[in-house]
Amino acid sequence: MKRLTQLLFSISLLLLLAACGAEASSGKQSDANKAKIQAVYDAWSNGTKEEWIKAYHSILADDYVRWNGRYVGLGFQIDQENLTVIEAMRSPAKENFKPGDKFISVNGIEATVENVEDLPFQGAIGGEVNIVLERDGEELSMTLVRAAQEQTATKEQVLANQEGWEGYDNRPTIKTFRPLIAEDNVVYAAFELSGTNGEGAEVNWWNVERFVFNEDGELVGHGDLSEELFLWQQNGYYLTNE
């Protein structure tokens, strides 16, 4: 019985030491992940566009996905200058649109370059969108029903968007930055941004972002947690130029 007790004690001690070692390792990894994210925000605040892109892309995994939130709509990308479909990614657009389709009217509103951002592709969830478009020289009419859509981007798409972004020098500034919080392989950031609207007035808003790392310390996921706009969109409200 004495030997059995000693054996059980030894096993328990080994398990405790292993747990402590794992916790210490996890803590070091969390600190390392926080440092990588802090470097990205530091580059945003004080660096050049090239330095910010380098800090961000140096930590990305090959299977990285950027989650840009949700919206209510049809699930496609539009060429605003030519009023044509670039790509139909999700339902119901995926089953009905083809690249190159040119919009003629949406819910009875003529589609023009001047009003393209205000065409009612978005609106209340479940709402009908009556579309007239041109395809291969023929005019087609269809009615689609708005649905919840996710906006995601791959590593390659994010890099292309960032390199092609011409507004970096006029980017919002970080007005208040809360200490980063890390839980295992996840890092949370909360910060207040400040910018100006079209009339030159200062506008401020809070962002909360979530970063997910793999076991190798590479970033596999990054997303904004706020969904206020998506909430309003489901009730039929959406942003326009008005």
Image: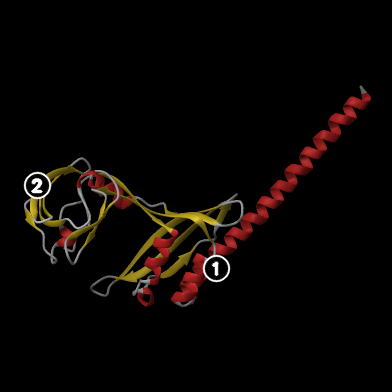
Q: Position of residue 151 (x, y in %)?
A: 34, 52
Tell me if 17 is positioned left or right of 237 in this view: right
The x and y percentages for residue 135 are 13, 54
Residue 11 picture quarter: top right
Relative side of 222 to 127, left or right: right
Badge 2: residue crowd in 10 Å (few <14, some 14–19, many ≥20)? few
Pick the front one: 162 or 196: 162
> Which quadrant does the N terminus fall into?
top right
Way the structure is coloured: secondary structure
Residue at horizontal 13 percent and vertical 55 percent from the top? 136
- Residue 97's disc is none
Q: In this view, does 186 lie to the left or right of 206?
A: right
Within 10 Å of the Cα at label 1, are there few (<14), some (14-19), or many (20+) other Cα atoms? some
Q: Which amino acid does label 1 sit on?
A: Ala
Marks 2/1: CA–CA distance:
51 Å
For the point 11% across and 63% down, which residue is it?
112
| Up-down relation of residue 105 to residue 16 (above or below) | below
Query: Which dot marks residue 141?
Result: 2
Q: Residue at x 54, y 66 (%)?
A: 58
Task: State the SS at label 2.
Answer: strand
* Image: 217 above or below 2: below
Q: Mark 1 points at which residue?
A: 39
Q: Is residue 29 above or below residue 201?
A: above
Camera-side residue: 12 or 76?
76
